[in-house]
Image: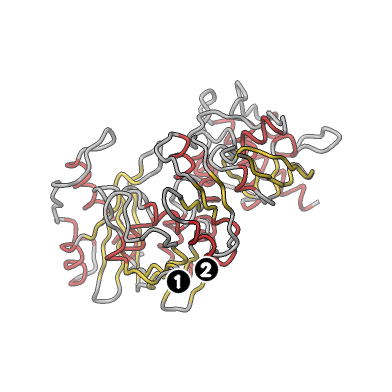
Amino acid sequence: MSVKVSLKVNGKPATAEVEERTLLVTFIRETLRLTGTHVGCDTAQCGACTVSMNGKAVKSCSMLAMQAEGADITTIEGVAKADGTLHPMQAAFKEHHGLQCGFCTPGMVMNAIDFANSHANPSEQEIREALEGNLCRCTGYHNIVKAIGAGAKAMAAAAAG
Amino acid sequence: MHAFKYHRPASIDAAAALAKGEAKLLAGGQSLVQAMKLRLASPSDIIDLGAIKSLAGIKSDGKTVTIGAMTRHAEVNHSADVKKAIPALAAMAGMIGDRQVRAMGTCGGSIANNDPAADYPAAVLALNATITTNKGRHEADKFFKGMFDTALQPGEIVTSVSFQVPKRAAYMKFKNPASRFAIVGVFVADFGGMVRVAVTGAGPGVFRQPEMEKALAAKFAPESVANIKVKQDGLNTDLHASAEYRAHLVTVMAKRAVEAALK
């Protein structure tokens, strides 16, 4: 049996017939072929699958594609500008070397952008708490925390224009 | 995950008509989708409540704070109305899971699931909440029936939860650092002469602690509970903590909750 799901991904309409049990992450990776969103643990611990749904960071492995019916989804592929200029949060991860193997990075960046939207100048403690749902097995988080602090400031500066 | 039939009703009545047999209601899905992936749950039908707009929202009238069943934890955490009326309830919502989980997880889903280590049941019990469903009302004291069990009948859907506004309250949680569920969580609410203390995570389901309630009603101060020894009989022992340790934590968390409520 299948069901029709219609949503918006990175600003473009996406409609497909999918099996009812299709997870949002499976739809993004296998139907839309947007493989920047990763599956790490598949049990809602690691946050590598984090995407933005209507502006809020959510774990796309922990919801059915149908739960995003009609929603506006942004994945890591949708945050840079069309000309390739990195999003300020991506640029901050690069600048502060907030990664080693990079597997967790898309989820980290997607969560960090949502967090920074409501925290223009977060404390280290606030950043560490915001990262409770994202695991990194390489870095020990130190540079990720620095990157998010810098990225949040850069986002606030860009918004102030 | 096993296959199922998916439904997306637009009204509570339509959802209730579908909720029979092996069908399951889907709220935020932060527990149910995981349980289905692990094949701990294999419903024949999924009834997604996500399209029923009337189920979400927060109302506050000074005496009660009413939270719609599909209201996300993040909304409760950030609500100015909840922060003003019952700051402890807003804070509790901000301690559930992680921020991505809080963007999806719901009040109704949490209490209907009644995970023995969930946070919401402690708030419902301590704040003497009334659970409204499509079929009637439940008092908090008669709602939770032990591990993953509630007074809800088949076809019964939680529509909202009304929490009584206390004089002061606080929730303290000793969390499992990996899952962020409560190893022990204690919610203390002072209604002026009447105090309710609800404990989650420690036993097979949320429960009240009458000895502490009596001592705190006489004098609402940390020292009233500091020397109360909680019996370990019936408390949980698992790889995270022994019953003896959990019993000790109930007193420690209760004391901290009273301290926090007095601030």
Tell me the chain of label 2.
B
Tell me the chain of label 1.
B
Spatial CA distance of label 2 from label 1 is 7 Å
2 or 1: tag closer to the N-terminus:
2
**Residue A55 spot, x, y in % from top left:** 67, 50
Identify the residue at image location x=46%, y=56%.
B19
Tell me, for residue B217, which label it has, or none.
Answer: none
Please report contact status of discs 2 and 1: CB closer than 8 Å, yes or no.
Answer: yes
Residue identified by numbered label 2: B58
Identify the residue at image location x=57%, y=29%.
A39
Identify the residue at image location x=53%, y=23%.
A138
In the displayed structure, A137 sits above or below A111; it is above
**Residue B73 spot, x, y in % from top left:** 50, 55
In the displayed structure, A59 sits above or below B73; it is above
In the displayed structure, A143 sits above or below B160; it is above
**Residue B96 spot, x, y in % from top left:** 44, 50
The part of the image, by quadrant, that contains residue A107 is top right
Callout 1 amino acid: Val
Residue identified by numbered label 1: B65
B158 vs A114, left or right, is left
A95 vs B181, left or right, is right
